[in-house]
Amino acid sequence: MVTMGESKMSSTASVERVRHTARGSEAGGASMDGTTWAMLAALSVLWGSAFVFAEIILKEVPVLSLVAMRIFLAAVPLWVMVVVLKQSVPRSAAVWSGFLILGIFNNAAPFSLIVWGQTGTTAGLAAILVATTPLFTALIAGAVLPDERLSIRTLSGIFLGIFGVGVMIGPGAITDADGDLFHQLAVVAAALCYAIAAVFARRFTRFGVPLLTVAAGQMALASAILVPAALWIDGPVFLHVEGADVWISILGVAFLSTAVAYLIYFAIIRRAGATNAVLVTVLVPVVAVLVGAIVLGESIGAAQLAGMAFIFCGLAVIDGRLMHVLKSKGAR
C-alpha cells in the first residue's frame, strides 16, 4: 500500500525528471546518442561530396557564381517546402536579423573564403585549417553557452581529431604550402565563421522557429547578398553552362550538399549542441578520401588509414561511452 507521503514524493520525483528532461532537450544536450551520430555521419557524406561536385562545376562556372548558384538553388526547394507544409513565416525583425547573421556566417562568408583561400594554398592544408572549426566552436561555446562548458575530454578529442586530419593529409600539406599567408588566413577565418554561426544558431533556438524555416531563411538572405554580386562580377554565366555533368553537380551540391545538409545540421545543433555539430568538419576529409577512392579510383595509403584511426579515436573520446565501458571493465 502506498502512503500519501510516498505518493507525493513519487509525484515530485516524476516532475523533477520531466523538468530535467525538458532542460536537457531545450539545451540541446551535450551527449551524442546513436541517432545523432548517424545524422553526423550522413552530414559528413553530404558535405564531403560537395568537393566532388565543386570540382566538376568549376570546369564551366567561376567561383563566386558557383557559390551563388549553390545557395540560391538550395533556397528555392526549402521555401517551396515551407509553403507546402504551411509553416508560418516569421515577421519578427529579430528573427530575420538572425537569418541574416546565419546567412553571412554560415553560408556567404565561409563558402567564399574557403574557395578563395584554396587558390593560394594546398587543398590538404585547407582541409586541416577547416578542421579547426570544432576547436573554435568549443572555445566560443564554452564562453557563452552555460551548458557547453569546455571539458578536458572534449578538448582532448578535438585535438586528436585535428591531429588525425593532419596525419591523413600528410606533412606535405604544410611543407609544400608556400602560398600566400592571406589565403591561409582566409580559410582560418572561414572556420571561425562556421564556429560563430554554430554558437549563434544554438542560441537562436530560443525563438522556436522550425528547422526548415531557419534553413530557408538563412539561404534566402545569403542569396540576396551573393546573387547580385555574382551577376555584377561574372555576368549570367548560368546561361552558358552546357555539360550535363555540370548541371547534375550543380543540382547535387544545391539540393543535397546544402538544402538537405543544413536541415540535418540544425537538427544536430538542437539535439546535441554547437560543439558536437561542427565535429562534421573533422569527418569531411575522411569522406573526401573515401569518395575519391570509390568514385575516382584513388588509392588509400597507410597515412590515410592512420589518420582516420586518430579521428575516430578523437570522436570516441568526445562521445565518452567507449571510455565509460573500458573503465567499467577495468574496475571489474
Image (tube, rainbow, N blue to C red):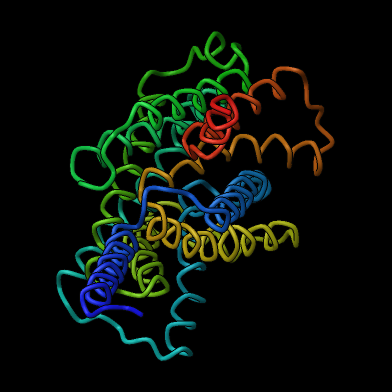
| Residue farthest to the top, as pictured | 175
Q: Say whether residue 250 is left or right of residue 98.
A: right
Residue pictured at 61% horizontal, 44% vertical: 51
Image location (x, y in percent) of residue 263: 48, 65
Image location (x, y in percent) of residue 328: 54, 32
Q: Say whether residue 172 is left or right of residue 273.
A: right
Residue pictured at 22% horizontal, 47% vertical: 145
Image location (x, y in percent) of residue 313: 58, 28
User: In this picture, is 181 found above or below 211?
Assistant: above
Residue pictured at 74% horizontal, 57% vertical: 245
Q: Say whether residue 100 is left or right of residue 128.
A: left
| Residue farthest to the right, as pictured | 297
Camera-nearest residue between 327 and 26: 327
| Residue farthest to the front, as pictured | 1
Disc count in the image? 0
Image location (x, y in percent) of residue 181: 38, 18
The quarter of the rendered structure image containing the C terminus is: top right
The quarter of the rendered structure image containing the N terminus is: bottom left
Residue pictured at 34% horizontal, 50% vertical: 198
Camera-nearest residue between 24 and 46: 24
User: In this picture, is 277 found above or below 212?
Assistant: above
